[in-house]
Structure formats: C-alpha cells, structure tokens
Image (tube, rainbow, N blue to C red):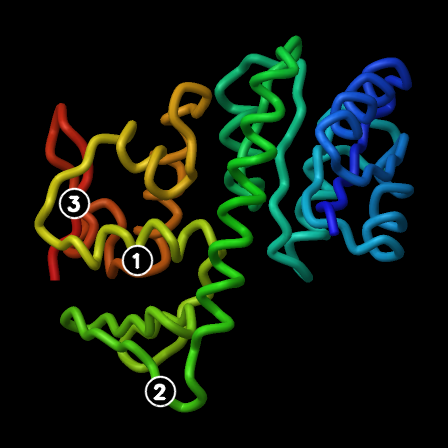
Amino acid sequence: MSSKILVVDDEQSIMNIIAFNLRKEGYQVVCAEDGEMAIKVFEQENPDLILLDIMMPKIDGYGVCKRIRDKSDIPIIMLTARADEIDKVLGLEIGADDYVTKPFGNRELMARVKANLRRKATVREEEKQVVENVGNVSNFGDLMIDFDRYEVFKRNKPVNLTIREFELLKFLALKKNQIFTREVLLSQVWGYEYYGDVRAVDVTIRRLREKIEDDASKPKHILTKRGIGYYFMS
C-alpha cells in the first residue's frame, strides 16, 4: 500500500497543487486547512508523513508540530514562507525533521518526501530485526547505546532522543574518531544529497550535545573539527 501524507496549509491553492503532485507520484493524500484540523486529521488518518505550513490560523505549525511530536515520531517537513534562520531553527528545535522554504519546486519537495519516508522505512525494518532480550550494546564511557533497541543511557539513566537524533548518534558512534562533513552526514543520516540544508545537522548536533554531554559547551563525545565537521570520541 502507498504511503499516506497529510498536507496542512491554509492557502487552498498551494494545498491543492501539493496534493495533486503527491497523488501523481502514487501517494495517498489527506488535507487540513488549519492547525486544529491538522491534529484531528492526524489522529483519525494515521498518516506516514506530514507536510506542515507554519503560518496558519487557530494553531500555527510550531504548535501542531510540538503536539504531534509529543505522541509520535512521524516525519514532519515544515513548509514556510519565512527565510529567517531563526524560524527554520525553531522548527527543527521542536522536533521537525526538515523544512522547505516557499516558493519551492515540485522536484525538490518530492525528493524531501521520498528521503524522509525512506529513512522511516529503514528504521522500522531495523526495529523488526531486533531479537527479544538481545541487544547490540556498546559502552562509551558514561554513555551506553543499544543500537538495536534505539535506546541510550547516561550513567544508567535513559536519554530521550528523537529518531533523527539517535540515527545521527548511531552513525557517528559506529564510526568513532572519523571526521564527517555536514554534507556527508546530511547524505548518510537524512538521506539527502543536493536538496538538503546543512543547518539541520548543526541543530541536531546541538540537541544531542544538550542531552548526552555533561556540558554541551565543552563536549566530550561529539566533537567538532574546526572547518571540517564532526566526529564521535568515546
């Protein structure tokens, strides 16, 4: 069965164009015109991905994203007419997986949709392969990572990570001491090549540091090689 996508935008013309192009690609599409309706449709339809406008009546896209992220790890791509970095970063900070700035081309949007659905499918397949009571566990100082169960513990206390945060941590930890540029991380973890925005990597790294480091300003696990990229040190 094809993936179901929820399109949320208060501009009817934009919503119709996006829905039309998604259906041409073979996706099922459900729509909502404001934030309140978006939450209701999400709960009723159980979509596989959400394309979410920021500027909307009743509840804006940030509010919708936060409420959905509290209960689901569904991929969320923010649609915004704002070009300011602070708006993009805020969306990523509250749990969005990605953003696309209007006006955007259909090819770019479809690439983002496919990449996020592919990543979700990969994660689900890995979860299915987990053997009961058996985990692929590694310890890195005070940090313990169960790669199969998508669990992280710091000094035996669970650390709550989003799937994207865990995927980035997993990629770096399994290749510890290797330095990766933001472009490589975007390609390997997000699944983007040409269309991705490296700012998403920086924001996710910052969130990870805040959760797993004693002092995010002086990290011991996720380090920066100035002018090059990031690497993991145990």
Q: Is mark 1 on a helix, strand or loop?
A: helix
Residue 19, position as x, y percentages in the image: 81, 26
Q: In this view, does 156 lie above or below 141?
A: below
State how far apart marks 2 and 1 are (Cα).
Answer: 18 Å
Residue for badge 3:
231
Give me the residue at 62% from left, 11% from top: 105
Give me the residue at 12% from left, 29% from top: 226
Give the amino acid type for the residue marked by disc 3 in the picture: Tyr
Residue 31, position as x, y percentages in the image: 87, 35
Give the amino acid type for the residue marked by disc 2 in the picture: Val
Residue for badge 1:
170
Residue for badge 2:
134
Q: Which of marks 1 and 3 is in front?
A: 1
State how far apart marks 3 and 2 are (Cα).
Answer: 28 Å
Residue 84, position as x, y percentages in the image: 53, 15
State how far apart marks 1 and 3 are (Cα).
Answer: 11 Å
Q: In this view, does 108 lie above or below 47?
A: above
